[in-house]
Image (cartoon, coloured by chain):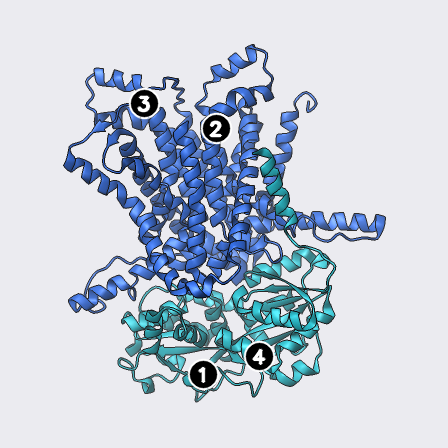
Chain colours: A blue, B cyan
């Protein structure tokens, strides 16, 4: 069977590797921890689950609203600064959720400059006035929404842009007003892309550790850490990860289900771009201000705060091996992104050319990694890889009386594998929805012309997929740059990254000292955004 | 493009200096890089050793060493609390080191009776207050916070935090399970807000007036007093330290410490490093940089700590703290300490 179908064999090997941590988590269920679970169920478990679900749904709604509205305004209306906003809107992607949370806490907390200024100005004291509590569920949802909305925005924009002009013309000729076009034509057509974007944001919210930990919100992820490290019960923690995975599974199923109901194949080869609607001066100005808001709150304000902190410490921070750190982070993220997107392409392509239950299951299971907290993935990787290393060492020792040491578990290999597992779902979603937009009749045409599977991928699909691949690389790159727990655990000796340095300082509440590494993450994260934005425009 | 990617990927794997021929020492540290690397560098220079450092959470480092087993390159583990040292010993990944140097300079209750781990600094957990709003005489014991007058006036961080877990664990060791549970049940009534943030945040909240007292480790205040941000220094100056339980069991003290890993490939150098860490030079730098109290008698405290005053410390065998950690956590869960 495999001789005739090398794709299948390759896919099986890849997905087996990708499933390692999930298997480790599932295997933990074989070892029930009744006593610990009884204690958890009596005390904190319902809170964990409830908070995780609220956080995910809230983040999903906020990103959906911001991302869709922003994308639609930018694609359909003409207003001041629209061309700039097109890519400015992507900038929050470069801002890690935990960094923005620290920044806004510094700004808006009771002891922060904003509230202090209010108290000084109006002579208020504690309890005499109401101010939104930043370290709350609403605060966490806002923080996540502000940095995660680009997931929806990117996909929504390309969906709106690829929308065929004929459909709009038809709707208009049937008497729809231009504003109703959004609800009646654009939104239904863009729905698969929108759901994908917000599902990604929700998974990110479910896996977040840094923000909720800092805000004191007990969720499943903090619960996993607490059970693991506080109670020292690794198995129960792994079982809690299984619970978290099942929440994500529901989310994934819902996302897939909502896409299955209707499948859209648009033929969008007409290169004529849709004319954007012109607005009156007042309205245009208002729209500029509204569209500026997400960028302002999600990027510019936190960056200004970080900069003011950075100004205080430049003489201490910049003397260090800063460029080494930046280079490390950049190379790691780039390498990881390339590997991840290649793997995603294999999986999605396998599913397309042979959409049987196995291929579907592989893609779906590979997507699960996104929701598993980095720490759990890291340990889930370390168990099998260390076992492998031990096996190799024992074998070589028996042959040559020589031990090479830790080959896989102690090197960058483990780190790249963790990134691949963790961020594959981002890549898959992009590649998959890109492939879904290529109508199956193209495949049939290519095959009827005698093209092999590989040559079809290279000559037909790859050029059409370029945009999706680029945005997949962008998203994974930035995600890896921001990734923390897995990097902390798996990185080899003397291998520090900007994120690790920023985290070490910030978790020590030395926000001022975290400013330089944080700003560097943000700035390095901007570079590929600019590059890929340009490439997308050219398309 | 493709070639460049390949070159980068190769560079990535090669760039990691993994095994080289020079004399090496592999350090796993839960202490942040900036707060330990300079002293390691000094040791490396004096002894012509190459030190490889990896930092991370203590628990993740411990489980990493456990998994790596006999292949682990780890020689020395540094942690910032006693609970993790005990956990490492219980996990069977540490080796005893009988050293006259260490025994001479580290008080007996601050090191493992079986020579598995050693304290390098002490960290005190105190009550902090703003003198304008709190009369320090009205608060001499931790238990005083359970009185009705203190309801809704205390800021303290989450029960997920190891310092709080260790504090409750020492109470457990001294008062027993029932009394500690009763204490915890009332203690949560003193909270001014649901626990959030770190120790520095509690100190800030006290100054801002959200609460009147906070529980925090002294080195956080010390760090704020020497912070690069003038606003932070200004906040810290308004806070005073109150040493609880001076008439009875003493103030809660945790430690930062170290242990040698079982099967350490470079054991002799590892042992030399531990001896070096209690030298006057190392003790003075390490304690001062971290704002903590040196374990070695006669090493001067930093000026900031001297200004906070002398105190009587709890005298609990520290290994109990690690052993009682899980029960402490359950007590806090039951009391509703978030």
Residues tagged 2 and 3 counted as in contact (Cβ below 8 A): no
- Residue A534 quadrant: top left
Indicate the quadrant containing the N terminus of chain A: top left, top right, bottom left or bottom right. Answer: top right
The chain letter under disc 4 is: B
The chain letter under disc 3 is: A
The earlier-in-sequence mark between 1 and 4 is 4
- Identify which residue, A444 or A529, lies in the foreground: A529
Indicate the quadrant containing the C terminus of chain A: top left, top right, bottom left or bottom right. Answer: top left
The residue beneath circle 2 is: A466
The earlier-in-sequence mark between 2 and 3 is 3
Where disc 3 sits, the SS reads loop
- Residue A160 quadrant: top left
The residue beneath circle 3 is: A273
Residues tagged 1 and 4 counted as in contact (Cβ below 8 A): no
Task: Give the vertical position of B188 relative to A461 (above or below).
Answer: below
The circle on residue B283 is 4
Give percent across and percent down for residue A213. 42, 58
- Identify which residue, B249 or B11, lies in the foreground: B11
Where disc 1 sits, the SS reads helix
Task: Give the vertical position of B313 relative to A260 (above or below).
Answer: below
Residues at discs 3 and 1 both on one chain: no
The circle on residue B303 is 1
Residues tagged 1 and 2 counted as in contact (Cβ below 8 A): no
Task: Give the vertical position of B319 relative to A342 (above or below).
Answer: below
User: CA gap, disc 2 to disc 3?
Assistant: 19 Å
The chain letter under disc 2 is: A
Residues at discs 2 and 3 both on one chain: yes
Residues at discs 4 and 2 both on one chain: no
Task: Give the vertical position of A469 relative to B78 (above or below).
Answer: above
Left or right of A25 in this view: A133: left
């Amino acid at each position: 069977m495999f001789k005739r179908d090398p794709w299948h064999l390759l896919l099986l090997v890849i997905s087996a590797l990708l499933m390692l941590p999930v298997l480790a988590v599932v295997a933990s269920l074989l070892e029930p921890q009744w006593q610990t679970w009884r204690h958890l169920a009596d005390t904190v478990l319902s809170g964990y689950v409830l908070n995780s679900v609220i956080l995910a749904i809230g983040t999903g709604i906020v990103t959906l609203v911001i991302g869709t509205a922003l994308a639609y305004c930018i694609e359909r209306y003409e207003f001041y600064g629209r061309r700039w906003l097109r890519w400015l809107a992507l900038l929050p992607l470069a801002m890690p959720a935990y960094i923005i949370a620290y920044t806004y806490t510094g700004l808006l907390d009771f002891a922060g400059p904003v509230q202090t200024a209010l108290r000084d100005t109006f002579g208020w004291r504690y309890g005499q006035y109401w101010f939104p509590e930043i370290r709350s569920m609403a605060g966490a949802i806002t923080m996540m929404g502000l940095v995660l909305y680009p997931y929806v925005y990117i996909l929504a924009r390309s969906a709106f842009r690829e929308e065929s002009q004929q459909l709009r013309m038809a709707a208009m000729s049937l008497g729809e007003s231009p504003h109703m076009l959004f609800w009646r034509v654009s939104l239904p057509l863009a729905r698969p892309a929108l759901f994908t974007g917000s599902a990604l944001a929700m998974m990110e919210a479910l896996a977040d550790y840094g923000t909720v930990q800092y805000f004191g919100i007990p969720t499943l992820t903090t619960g996993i850490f607490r059970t693991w490290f506080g109670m020292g019960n690794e198995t129960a923690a792994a079982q809690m990860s299984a619970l978290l995975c099942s929440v994500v599974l529901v989310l994934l199923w819902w996302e897939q289900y909502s896409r299955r109901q209707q499948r859209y194949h648009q033929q969008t080869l007409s290169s004529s771009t849709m004319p954007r609607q012109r607005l009156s001066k007042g309205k245009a100005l208002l729209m500029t201000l509204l569209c500026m808001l997400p960028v302002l709150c999600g990027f510019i304000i936190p960056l200004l705060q970080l900069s003011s902190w950075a100004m205080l410490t430049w003489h201490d921070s910049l003397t260090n091996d800063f460029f080494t750190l930046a280079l490390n982070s950049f190379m790691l993220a780039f390498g990881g992104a390339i590997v991840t997107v290649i793997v995603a392409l294999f999986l999605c392509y396998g599913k397309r050319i042979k959409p049987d239950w196995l291929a579907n299951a592989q893609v779906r299971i590979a997507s699960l990694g996104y929701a598993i907290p980095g720490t759990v993935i890291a340990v889930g990787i370390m168990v099998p890889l260390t076992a492998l290393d031990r096996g190799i060492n024992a074998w070589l020792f028996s042959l040559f009386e020589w031990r090479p040491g830790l080959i896989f578990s102690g090197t960058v290999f483990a780190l790249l594998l963790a990134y691949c597992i963790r961020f594959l779902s981002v890549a898959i979603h992009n590649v998959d929805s890109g492939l879904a937009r290529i109508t199956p009749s193209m495949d049939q045409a290519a095959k009827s012309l005698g093209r092999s599977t590989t040559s079809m991928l290279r000559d037909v699909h790859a050029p059409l997929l370029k945009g999706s691949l680029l945005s997949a690389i962008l998203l994974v790159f930035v995600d890896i740059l921001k990734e923390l727990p897995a990097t902390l655990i798996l990185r080899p000796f003397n291998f520090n990254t900007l994120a690790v340095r920023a985290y070490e300082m910030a978790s020590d509440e030395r926000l001022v000292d975290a400013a330089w590494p944080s700003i560097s993450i943000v700035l390095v994260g901007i570079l590929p955004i600019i590059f890929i934005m340009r490439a997308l425009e050219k398309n | 493009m493709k070639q460049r990617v390949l070159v980068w990927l190769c560079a990535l794997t090669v760039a990691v200096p993994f095994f080289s021929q020079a004399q090496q020492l592999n350090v796993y540290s839960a202490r942040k890089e900036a707060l330990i690397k300079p002293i390691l560098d000094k040791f490396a220079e004096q002894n012509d050793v190459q030190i490889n450092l990896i930092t991370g959470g203590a628990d993740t480092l411990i489980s990493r060493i456990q998994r790596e087993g006999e292949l682990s390159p780890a020689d020395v583990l540094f942690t910032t609390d006693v609970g993790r040292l005990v956990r490492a010993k219980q996990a069977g990944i540490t080796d005893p080191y009988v050293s006259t140097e260490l025994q001479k300079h580290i008080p007996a209750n601050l090191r493992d009776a079986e020579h598995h781990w050693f304290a390098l600094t002490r960290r005190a957990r105190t009550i902090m207050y703003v003198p304008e709003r709190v009369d320090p005489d009205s608060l001499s014991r931790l238990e005083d916070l359970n009185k009705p007058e203190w309801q809704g006036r205390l800021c303290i961080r989450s029960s997920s935090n190891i310092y709080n877990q260790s504090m409750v664990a020492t109470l457990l060791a001294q008062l027993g399970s029932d009394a500690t549970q009763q204490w915890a049940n009332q203690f949560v009534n003193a909270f001014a807000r649901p626990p959030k943030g770190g120790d520095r945040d509690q100190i800030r909240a006290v100054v801002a007036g959200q609460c009147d007292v906070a529980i925090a480790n002294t080195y956080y205040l010390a760090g704020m007093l020497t912070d690069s941000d003038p606003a932070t220094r200004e906040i810290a100056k308004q806070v005073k330290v109150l040493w609880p339980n001076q008439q009875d069991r003493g103030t809660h003290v945790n430690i930062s410490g170290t242990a040698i890993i079982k099967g350490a490939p470079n054991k002799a150098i590892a042992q030399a490093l531990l001896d070096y860490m209690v030298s006057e030079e190392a003790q003075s730098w390490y304690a001062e940089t971290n704002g903590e109290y040196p374990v070695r008698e006669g090493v001067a405290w930093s000026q900031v700590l001297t200004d906070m005053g002398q105190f009587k410390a709890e005298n609990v065998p520290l290994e109990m703290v690690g052993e009682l950690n899980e029960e402490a956590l359950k007590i806090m869960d039951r009391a509703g300490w978030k």
